[in-house]
Amino acid sequence: MTILLTAGNGKTGRRIAARLDALGIPVRLGSRSGTPPFDWADPATWPAALSGVDAAYVNYVPDLAVPDAPKAIETFTAEAARQGVRRLVLLSGRGETEAERCERIVQANAPEWTIVRCSWFAQNFSEDYLLADVLDGTIRVPVTDVREPFVDVDDIADVAVAALTDPRHTGQLYELTGPRALTFAEAAAEIAAASGRSVGFESVSIDDYAAGLRAAEYPEDVIWLVTYLFTEVLDGRNEAVRDGVQRALGRPAKDFAEYAKGAAESGAWAE
């Protein structure tokens, strides 16, 4: 089989690609620089990228939370059906209204589907915008004591690979979390313990946070998305721990402390 990975160079996509390569399964990386190219912003690239594909990992960029996402997913799933793609695995968002609309679109149109529903990645602290805060010594975000069961991206990749390659996962909705919910202050303490760095936490206003992103020249669509995630999604609705990793893989989800230890050993927070 041949598998298309949309956003194939992202945090989840590149991990899934490595796992599929190890299994000897042909992978088509969906990216603007791929062959053929794939660009979520250019539907004209979708038919060629989907041609000859048996399954696709659907990771919509920038996020399923944005208003344009349902239309894009509807168009993509229709094109996948025309191309004879049987299996779609959708990376979805916990507690996001637009994401749940996209889930229903995939469920209604794909012959075989699996939903992988996640929220905040642990790797945001080591591979994304929170890395700079960790290196500066203070994680500054517009939250207080809300808890989040940060999910490890390696768990997401393992579940996605299982869903892409094994029909036993067809028709399943896996809600993935870590095994315990942490505040951002507690996450900072875990990172400090693992890395030996001084890492604290400071709550800031959403206006100040957005102003900081603008000062760092983040695009306005990214600022809107991050603001939405902090003010709408990170409000306690996702505090509950779920058993999706256990259900899908038959093993416990990776704990944040284990993630922090591995990230520190890899040099993610070394100067």
Image (cartoon, rainbow, N blue to C red):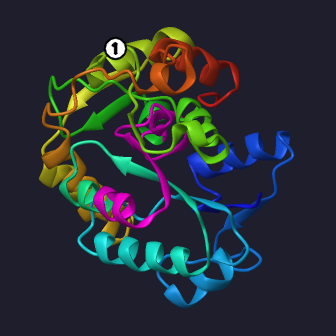
Task: Find out whether residue 224 is within the magenta segment.
Answer: no
Nearest the eye: 91 or 127: 91
Q: Residue at x 44, y 63 (%)?
A: 60
Coordinates of residue 13 in the picture (x, y in percent): 62, 51
Q: Residue at x 81, y 50 (%)?
A: 25
Coordinates of residue 104 in the picture (x, y in percent): 29, 59
Q: Residue at x 50, y 44 (%)?
A: 170
Asked if 254 appears above or below 47 in the picture, the reply is above
Q: Which amino acid lies under the numbered mark 1 shown in the image of this protein?
A: Arg
Count of marks placed on residues: 1
Coordinates of residue 112 in the picture (x, y in percent): 51, 55
Instruction: Name, please, the residue furthest toward the top.
Output: 193
Classify residue 9 as left or right of residue 255: right
Nearest the eye: 84 or 249: 84
Q: Would residue 237 be visible to someone looking at this image?
A: yes
Q: What span is colored magenta in the figure?
A: 103-131
Q: Would residue 196 be visible to someone looking at this image?
A: no
Coordinates of residue 150 in the picture (x, y in percent): 38, 27
Classify residue 175 as left or right of residue 123: left
Q: Which residue is mark 1?
A: 180
Asked if 33 appears above or below 191 in the picture, the reply is below
Q: Where is residue 127, by image quadrant?
A: top right
Quadrant of the frame with the N terminus: bottom right
Circle 1: is it few (<14), some (14-19), or many (20+) Cα within 10 Å?
Answer: some
Classify residue 216 as left or right of residue 80: left
Quadrant of the frame with the C terminus: top right
SS class, disc 1: loop
Q: Residue at x 36, y 75 (%)?
A: 74
